[in-house]
Image (cartoon, helix red, strand yellow):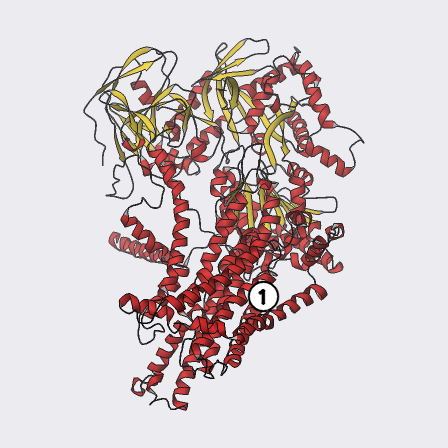
Amino acid sequence: MAPKKPTSTQNTTLQTMGMDVIKQYPGPLTVSRAVKLPGKHFPQLTGAEQNASYAGTAVEFKISIFLLCKGGDSDGIGVVSALQCWPEVSSTGGMPTSLFGLIPVVLMGMAIKIQEDRLRHQSDYRANTARCRRLVDGVFVDARWTDVQVGDLLKVCNREGIPADLLLVAASEPDPDTLRGACHVETMQLDGETNLKGKSAPAGLAAELGPTVETQLHSSIDSEAPDGSPNTYNGTLHIEGRPAVPLTVVNMLLRGSTLRNSEYVLGIVVNTGHDTKVIQGLRAPSHKQSTLLSSINQMIVWIVLLLLVLCLIAGAAELALYHELDLVDHWYMNTQKEEDGVAATFLVNTVYFFLLLSAFVSVTLYVNILLSQKLIQYFMQWSLSMYDPESDTPMRVRNSQLVDELGVISHVFSDKTGTLTQNVMQFRKASIGGIAYGRGTSEIAVARMKRLGELPAGEDVEAGATEGAAAHSPPGGSVISRHVNFDDPALVEALGGSDEQGKRCREFFLHLALCHTVVTEVVYGERSLSASSPDETALVAGAERFGYRFIERHHDTVELQGPDGEPLQYEVLDVLEFSSARRRMSIVVRNSQTRAISLLSKGADTVMLPLLASGQEELVAQTEAHMHDHSNDGLRTLVIASKELSEEEYLSWSERYRRAASDLDEVEKKSREEPNAIDDQCDAMESRMRLLGSTALEDKLQEGVPACIADLVKAGIATWMLTGDKEETAINIAYACELLDSTTTVVVVGLKTHPNVEDITRALREATAAAEESMELSANAQRGRRALVIDGGALGLLFGAAPEAPACQLEFLRFTQTCATVVACRCAPAQKAKLVRLVRRNVRGVSALAIGDGANDVAMIQTAHVGVGISGKEGMLAVNAADFAIAQFRFLREMLLVQGRHNYRRIAVTVYYVFYKNIMFTLVIFWAQFFAAFSGTKWNLEAGNQLYNVLLTMFPILWFSVFDKDVSDETSLALPQLYHLGPGNHFYFNWRATLRWIFQAIYESLAIALLCVFSLDGLSPDGESPGLYLIGACTITLAIVVPNLKLILWFFSWNIWSFVLIGFEVVLWWGVGGVVASEIKPENRGTSGEFIAQFVLGWHKLWGNVNELGTFWLLMLLVPAVVLLPQVFYSFYMRRFHPQFRDLAMECEYHGLPIDALKAWQIPAGQRQRRLVKGAPRPLYQASRFQRLCASLCGSKAKSESARSTATRA
């Protein structure tokens, strides 16, 4: 549908630099959304934002209750409650007493949801009540963001937030006679990047809305459908009488960004509210399920099957005894009539026992785990050991359901820049005209020299470099010194020379001062640089140190100050922006004085060197040698090149480039990173260039990184470093980080030495054979003695479409499982995610953690089992996509080796304990049926049944799951080997441990039932039989006391609260029994009375009689000793004759013995090794069953349409 044209004209009076400027504005523009689906229309929304789940209305409250009653524990309670309403099978007189247990579950869930939603409500309120300036009847008036509508004209002032997605119309300019259609915005909240981004108005619109133009502007905008991509936008501006103007993201001011460096801007609203890109991009985080929870789901299936077996046994036994004992005429037994049929009777009996034994499957397991995880989340975030005081950044848990997964990590995939390093670049060295400049040694080079024994004793290379830089600083070099650490007086001398080399040096630094997208900003009275990356900041600072000071960037000009203080001005004709695919950026400038046009380009050596003109072979060889030396020092290198252009050459290219840039199809292809004419024209310009030299920047390691990685390796965690750096740089950084050491056997696989898949496969197969042979020769062979270094080219072949690629992937997986370290250099962002996915899908028992700090790490972070984002110099995008956030890599040591290990052990015991106590409690009821002819008689108090999980056994295990520690945090850090008990689920949580807990539940329940029955039978004070309810009172009391006392055996860090909570649960049960027996009378009938009567059935005045029995109190002492002493003896035997490494650490800590001898212990190779899954390698991307069905249906439909089309043409 063609957009309608506005018919009215509005006059707007703007105050600009104290002058009144009258502008003709056409009123709200018509904005339509052209989509490919015919008939698809989008309603016009207001600017209101709601991220909260519930708005607080009565309807939403009911919906929230409904949703909380679905899933997990609530589903099981709901099924049982529904069956209890079936009188023929109900064990509660047709009353759904299980609903009583649903109330605490729902209340706990609501409390958690309310706490989470409260923060969203606060955020929504702040956003919706923010103020903006909206044009109404020719005057800008204050309005709320919620009042903004599509087509409005808004005025946004400096450092104010953008209230909607706006098309930039114009920006303020000190000179009112000069048109300015450009500004800068900060997009920290939008995409997490900290640099300022340039925005410009469409050329056609800026021309029509000049400050002196007074014309009625008939225009409209065709906009794309709303989406969540902040880096792309496709639209078309239609101005009457002019060609259509393509709109891109450069023309848009997106909601969530902040205006900077402009007094104000004018913008037309294109998207509002939930249509804006920032809100469209808010997706629910991908559901990641911990390894423990996956195992729990499998266990629940088996436990339900076991419950069904018990029900079938009980149902069959009841039916057999019915005929064996001839119970037809025993009306008081309430048996089924024969005419009902055997099958029907058996079915009814089975369902009845299912309800009677329904507590066999815990109804509060997930509540226990959820509460534990939430409490752990808060204590982790409050931990001072993971708090960074420099940036005032605490640790953040963004997905509390993965706190236990931190204890089973087997692989860590780490980015380098900003993750292992500080991402604070320093200009250290350069190669100009084939001559290397820069003295001193980098931090990573020092580590390399120490490893090779080349470092002279007592030499302090770092101090010498810094002091030398200060001593030989040229004039004006005192600015931004934190980004420059350069020492070489020869360069200062060369810059002042009049020879050819002096000219090259001056041209080199002039290039650095011009070829960038840096903007200046005054913050609190101080000048600062805002760049797209720390590299650009360091390069501009380096140019400033050596005489070429960047002053300011305007819309199309750059102002510099030369070595002698003379002003220099260059007109920016075109900027060919950097992208991960191009790996370079270029700028076309014109000297305002000489009118000479130049192309200035910089980028990675792999893409820049092939673009150089011929005849520079010697210079290229010299520069490559210098870059190789710089890479060995761990420095990041860039190639600097340029080209002179004639006026005719530039105009010819500019016409082709602008034609391609205005082609909507080509713009769309470029946004999808497909081959396009725009990039082709960039490639045509960036050719036959002249080499100027190269730069070398240092990015120092973060504090504590080597120690952290060394401990991760000792813990048995395979650590992979994925970086885009050159091979030499990556290897030397790996040595400096202690990923590699002098004993490591390093296998290097690169595209130069292995140019095809077959060569890579052969090399990996030979390396695997050598590793396996080494492991056979030495039983104590450690995986830390092997490492793989592979480059991006080889990975491209590994993940390629060649038929041999799967075999290559298999050999890659086999060899990497023998390695402690893998270094992937020249690695693209997509390859990082593919590596994580390859390992995750094909290695059995693996749990992968990915950690990074930038947008290029997001895919890797989301692919891994656990994603960790570092809040660094590249913004918060990685943090927003991660499950956990930290400020420094070294905090990963505390997060895994201390918090993760404790969390996993405690929650694993919690899961077993909850299963155990429910199985034990239910089996007591089952064994009692042997003494009641399987009549289904219920011994236990129904109130006790319903309170058992939610009140009577809840608090001690909750305390244990949050606070218990087997060893101190200091010991956990001093002995990283303790961590190896978690990965692979081979100690804390496995099927052997599961069977052991189930066996304990069977034994203890049998002991409770038998001892109570045989001890109490015929022992009442008056000589009568005590009755089933009295025996049931004893059994349920022991079923509450024994699990609480059993937990004492699992507490390692005892304190007063442990015993207080256990005692509280026991005393609470006595209180419940007393209240039920004395206050609730059986004659209270009616609808509600019948419901209450089921909770107190058989207990009127019973509790007093029970407490008067001496046998009862003897059982309270005897039974716990009988059932718990075997576990005490078993634990003593295992720790005395088969101790784990953890047992030794606990003994040393308990007795105050030194642990130095334990530090040398190494994890057995068999526990490090991981097996590949059956059928490896699996495809990296596999469609679901539903997707495959849809694809097959679409394929069949396409074939039929093709056949019909062919028949029609025939």
What residue lies at 52% left-to-right and 61% top-to-bottom? 911
The image quadrant that residue 47 belongs to is top left
Q: Position of residue 1198 (x, y in %)?
A: 32, 54
Quarter placement of the N terminus: top left
Name above or below for residue 795 compared with residue 424. Answer: below
Q: Position of residue 456 (x, y in %)?
A: 80, 31
In the rendered structure, the answer to whether residue 819 lies left or right of residue 240 reads right
Q: Position of residue 1070 (x, y in %)?
A: 47, 65
524 or 906, which lies in front? 906
The residue singled out by tag 1 in the image is 993
Quarter placement of the C terminus: bottom left
Q: Position of residue 154 (x, y in %)?
A: 31, 25
Name above or below for residue 718 compared with residue 1111. Answer: above
Q: Give the structural element (helix, strand or loop) at label 1.
A: helix
In the rendered structure, the answer to whether residue 803 lies left or right of residue 821 reads left
User: What amino acid type is highlighted by mark number 1?
Assistant: Ala
What residue lies at 32% left-to-right and 36% top-to-bottom? 273
